[in-house]
Amino acid sequence: MDFHLIFRGSVVRRAAVMAAIVGCIIAAINHGNHIWAGTMSISAWVKVGITFFVPYTVSTISSVLALREQDRLIETLRETQKANGLGTAGGGLPTT
């Protein structure tokens, strides 16, 4: 896995937003009655924390896989353009 992508700003922001939204929904479904009643135990709060970690991880993995696929597609397009004698003057992708 491309670990540098895990810490990319856009990946972290997207994962944090997804964790906040999905984590709140799942925590409310699983523990809402105890949260509202104020009867949450320490172990239940730990479970709520883990609940937020799961969507964060899923979103991060999904974003990294999408970025890797995008990089592969761009590289394939550049190779195809090069093989066909196309460059940036012919409307191709600029080389990095």
Image (cartoon, grey):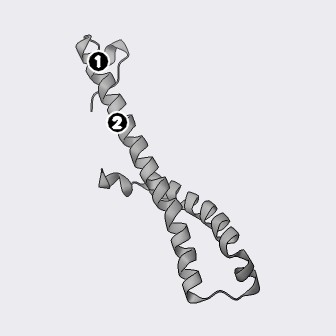
Residue 75 lies left or right of residue 36; in this view the side is left
Q: Is residue 29 above or below residue 80?
A: below
Q: Quadrant of residue 69?
A: top left
> At 30% from the left edge and 50% from the top edge, which residue is drawn?
2
Residue 84 lies left or right of residue 74; in this view the side is left
- Image quadrant where one finds the C terminus: top left
> At 58% from the left edge and 82% from the top edge, which residue is drawn?
45
Circles 1 and 2: CB distance less than 8 Å?
Answer: no
Residue 55 lies left or right of residue 36; in this view the side is left
Q: Position of residue 62 (x, y in %)?
A: 45, 48
Q: Quadrant of residue 65?
A: top left
Provide the secondary structure element on which disc 2 rests. helix
Q: Circle 2 is placed at which residue position?
A: 71
Q: Earlier in the sequence, mark 1 or mark 2?
A: 2
Q: Circle 1 is placed at which residue position?
A: 80
Q: Is residue 34 above or below residue 83?
A: below
- As drawn, the label of residue 30 is none
> At 34% from the left edge and 36% from the top edge, which residue is drawn?
71
Q: Nearer the viewer, residue 95 or 47?
A: 47
Residue 45 lies left or right of residue 84; in this view the side is right
Q: Amino acid at mark 1?
A: Thr
Q: Amino acid at mark 2?
A: Asp
